């Protein structure tokens, strides 16, 4: 399910009214959203998604009743009252939707292809994936940045008239086993990421984090983080 996938990005989540669920990793490096079949009537937040899913799994064909402060899950004679957490106590995505400053490369990625490359990466013991445009061909590859002369497992996924090499840490790709349409921007997200970091820093400070604890929370370049923390 979407929640099972999103818990690998952030163990907590805040859900707004409607049928779209959004999440962000605690350090702001991964942002995800998905549209679901169900429509949520009110805003609410879950502190431990894994625990919530475990509770929900106790019921078969359950009904969910949303109240202002809690959710009641019931089936037959059994029920549980699940109390929401305060949204201020968790890291939540920015209210403004993130958008690409430009779309320089785009392609369709089949789930079977992604699974194949991920399997190749695991067998080879690598941790990075590369999207490469070279000599008219577009490939998805499992690579090693530590040893650029090592083996490479790759799958050709299309054609391109551009020359580029995009490296992605595989643990950042928290995606469901479905087909995707991928867009890449050469301009990146520097300005948007800085604002996201500032928002997360503000949330951490509300929860009592000092500057040293905030520094330890992140894995970003020090100068980028200091601009967020000190200002």
Image: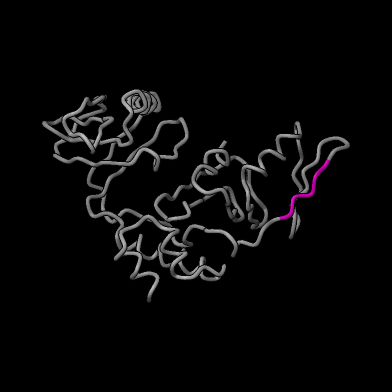
Based on the picture, tell me whether residue 108 belongs to the magenta stretch: no
Splitting the image into 4 quarters, where does residue 61 fall? top right
In the drawing, does residue 217 fall left or right of residue 90?
left
- Left or right relative to 143: residue 65: right
Task: Give how far across and how far down residue 140 sits, in percent.
Answer: 27, 31
**Could you say which is closer to the camera, residue 50 or residue 222?**
222
Outermost residue toward the bottom in this view = 231
Furthest toward the left, the residue is 135
**Image coords of residue 166 (percent x, y):** 24, 42
Residue 207 rendering spot, x and y as whole percentages: 57, 67
Viewer-nearest residue: 191 or 178:
191
Which quadrant holds residue 152? top left
Q: Quadrant of the C terminus?
A: bottom left
**Closest to the observer, 132 or 161:** 132
Dominant SS in magenta? strand
Q: Is residue 147 left or right of residue 212?
A: left
Above or below for 155 versus 230: above
Point out the residue furthest to the right here.
Answer: 77
Query: What segment is highlighted magenta in the picture?
Result: 79-83
* Residue toward you, 195 or 125: 125
The answer to whether 230 is drawn above or below residue 109 in the figure is: below
Left of 175 or right of it: where is 181?
left
User: Which residue does the image show at 14% across and 39% down from the upper left?
Assistant: 163
Residue at left offset 23%, top offset 28%: 158
């Amino acid at each position: 399910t979407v929640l099972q996938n999103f818990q690998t990005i952030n163990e907590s989540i805040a859900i707004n009214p409607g049928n779209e669920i959004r999440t962000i990793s605690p350090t702001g490096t991964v942002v995800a959203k998905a549209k679901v079949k169900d429509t949520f009537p009110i805003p609410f937040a879950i502190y431990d998604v894994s625990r919530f899913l475990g509770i929900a799994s106790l019921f078969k064909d359950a009904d969910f009743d949303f109240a202002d402060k809690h959710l009641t899950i019931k089936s037959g004679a059994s029920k549980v009252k699940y109390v929401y957490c305060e949204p201020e106590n968790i890291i939540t995505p920015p209210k403004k939707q993130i958008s690409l400053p430009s779309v320089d490369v785009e392609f369709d990625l089949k789930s079977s292809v992604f699974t194949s490359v991920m399997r190749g990466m695991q067998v080879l013991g690598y941790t990075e994936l590369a999207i490469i445009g070279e000599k008219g061909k577009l490939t998805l590859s499992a690579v090693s940045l530590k040893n650029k002369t090592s083996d490479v497992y790759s799958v050709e996924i299309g054609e391109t008239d551009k020359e580029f090499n995009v490296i992605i840490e595989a643990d950042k790709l928290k995606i469901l086993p479905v087909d995707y349409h991928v867009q890449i921007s050469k301009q990146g997200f520097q300005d948007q990421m800085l604002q996201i970091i500032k928002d997360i820093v503000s949330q951490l400070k509300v929860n009592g984090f000092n500057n040293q604890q905030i520094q330890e929370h992140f894995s970003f370049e020090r100068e980028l983080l200091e601009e967020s923390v000190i200002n």
